[in-house]
Image: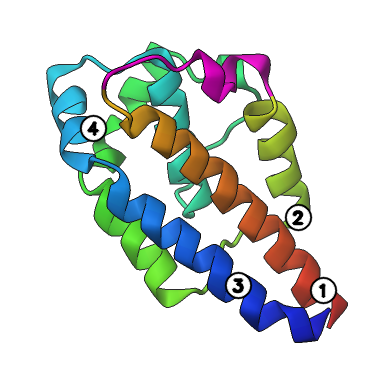
Amino acid sequence: MIQLRNPFFQKLSLLIHALIEIIQWENIYQAINNNTLTLHLKRVLIIVLRLIGEPIQLTNLNTINDAFFDQHKHRLTNIKEKVTQFFGTLSGSDLSINDLRIIKTNFLDDPFMRVEEITSDDKSPLLLTLFVKQMTLQQILRNHIFLSQ
């Protein structure tokens, strides 16, 4: 398992970095400023914040509503830089395996978070959702590999 770690992380990191570059962050910033984000995208952005270590308490997908989003909207002012910095250091998340599993089962596996339901000319919401799913997978596997050492 340890021998697979470096090539695996390199390939998964390349995929995640590519997604970071492909996402049109300007469209997301514009939607935040114009207050035109869909509820789905609000939920995805809150999950991104939690995954990169922002102290946000989440219980299930229904807790992320418009009022909850408005409380944490100020944290999104430089989300691209935060995400890029998070993956630039490769330090990983401070979330435990249980926290990551809760995010996966309570949020990402929820039927309302399916990528098939995202229909828009702008592909940023779709790419951001894929990014969150890959990021969660990478953090779960990273924790498993480090625990097995």
Estimate the x, y position of residue 115 in percent, counting from the top left.
53, 24
Quarter-wise, where is residue 2 in the image? bottom right
Q: Amino acid at mark 3?
A: Phe
4 or 2: tag closer to the N-terminus: 4
Residue at image position (40%, 14%) is: 119
Estimate the x, y position of residue 80 in percent, counting from the top left.
27, 51
**Distance of mark 4 from mark 1, alpha carbons?**
36 Å
Q: Amino acid at mark 1?
A: Leu
On the rendered image, what quadrant is the C terminus found in? Answer: bottom right
Let me know if residue 16 appears in the view.
yes
Say how the picture is coloured.
rainbow
Depth order, front residue of 103/2: 2
Q: Are marks 3 and 1 in contact (CB under 8 Å)?
A: no
Q: Which residue is mark 4?
A: 28
Q: Which residue is mark 2?
A: 97
**Distance of mark 1 from mark 2, alpha carbons?**
10 Å
Q: Amino acid at mark 2?
A: Ile
3 or 4: tag closer to the N-terminus: 3
Let me know if residue 72 appears in the view.
no
Which disc is residue 147 wearing? Answer: 1
Depth order, front residue of 28/59: 28
**Distance of mark 4 from mark 2, alpha carbons?**
29 Å
Density class for disc 4 (Cα within 10 Å; few <14, some 14-19, many ≥20) is many
Residue at image position (46%, 66%) is: 14
Residue at image position (27%, 19%) is: 121
Q: Are marks 4 and 1 in contact (CB under 8 Å)?
A: no
Q: Which residue is mark 3?
A: 9
On the rendered image, what quadrant is the N terminus found in? Answer: bottom right
**Distance of mark 2 from mark 3, alpha carbons?**
17 Å
1 or 2: tag closer to the N-terminus: 2
4 or 1: tag closer to the N-terminus: 4
Quarter-wise, where is residue 108 in the image? top right
